[in-house]
Amino acid sequence: MGVPLLKEELPVVDKIWSRDFMMIFLANFFVFLSFQMTTPTLPLFVKELGGNERYIGLVAGMFLFSALIVRPFAGQALETKGRRFVFLFGLALLAVAIGSFGFMMSIFLLCAIRIVQGIGWGYATTASGTIASDLIPAKRRGEGMGYFTLSGNLAMAFGPSFGLFLADVLTFQHLFLFCGVLSLAAWIMASTITYTKVDHAPASAKTNRFDIYEKSAVAPSVLVFFITVTFGGTATFLPLYTIEKGLTGIQGYFFLYALALIFTRMFAGKIYDQKGHQAVFIPSTLFIVVAMLLLAWMPSNLILYMAAIFYGIGFGAVQPALQAWSLEHAARNRKGMANATFYSFFDLGIGFGAILFGQIGYLFGYISIYIMASVSVGISIVAYLWILRKMKEG
């Protein structure tokens, strides 16, 4: 009588690829596909509107800083209003905002609608990572989060190239409307998920109105800030940099970068689960440093492609490891806030990088962007070694 019960229970304990996990995976894929299609095409649209590198950085930064501001509120809402409300609300804002891009006929209006997109992005991506964490068995969190983030990596494999292709054959209005429809498709998928009920903290633990971060997630979140600064330089300015260099391999760069990410995610999460972040962080960040220096040099498409592979391996390993670390010591009723803390620093790094590198690129040229990006990753390595020492002393 007891054996059938065991057979029924064991798969539930260890299973990652449940129906709900597949739905959050697909919804996240469509959200990121929409985002990745606009990443290389929005700078072209800004150029068409008469903007320069400074305005491109501003448009990118407005989006990310608005996402940063709302993430703590999204984290609180996940624990008070529930996963479903926060996720669907964020996806609805994304669909409306992205679909409106092509109708913004001035940079000021584009910045305004990017703020709306940032709010939607902050709510939707904070919710999606938290929902995925709810669905993954705790002892397989590193592996499961690696699989989950593959959804974004697959979008990276096709999104930028597909977006650039459509920009050649469609008007910007039709391109961005199509991207808005992708976010709408994510909303439909998200509405089918059975959401986990949150175990709320005791009333005495919910009295702080200014509870905007999870303390246990701060260390990995600070590290991810210095790393994602590099993404602000590559995703925002690399298409323009390759044009300046006379290279034609930008679509190949995004594709190879994504393939390297996907390949790395197949095993990096398992390494984290078995050996911890100590086995992942230093090798991964060194790969990113090499990638940034290759981009600064970049005499040919071959070097561009090598940089894509190095960057994909490094970022593909370190990002899910840091995210799993940020969730590892948070209480169940604090997972949403831990995820919000992680993504706040994640967005802050990208937004800060986009704005800072926009200024640096305008004043000193694109090559200086990637030299400074390598310095930022070097800072993360020094900070990590300091954190390790403090952890051992504690």
Image (cartoon, rainbow, N blue to C red):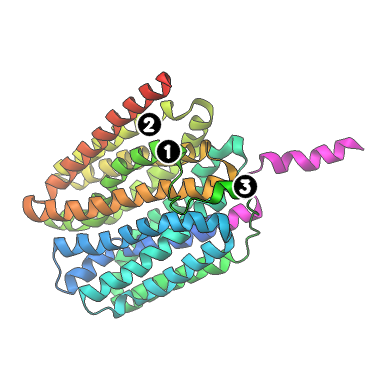
Q: In the figure, residue 318 lies in which quadrant?
A: top left
Residue receiving disc 1:
322
**What amino acid is labelled 2 in the image?**
Phe
**What amino acid is labelled 1 in the image?**
Leu
The tag on residue 202 is: 3
At x 17% / y 69%, what residue is drawn?
47
Where is residue 152 drawn, in percent x and y? 44, 53
Residue receiving disc 2:
281
- Tag 3 secondary structure: loop
- Image quarter where the C terminus lies is top left
Q: Magenta segment range?
A: 1-23
Task: Tell me which secondary structure the magenta stretch mostly adopts.
Answer: helix
- Tag 1 secondary structure: helix
Pointer 2 and pointer 1: residues touching (CB < 8 Å)? yes
At x 18% / y 73%, what residue is drawn?
48
Compared with 107, 3 (above or below) is above
Magenta stretch contains residue 221: no
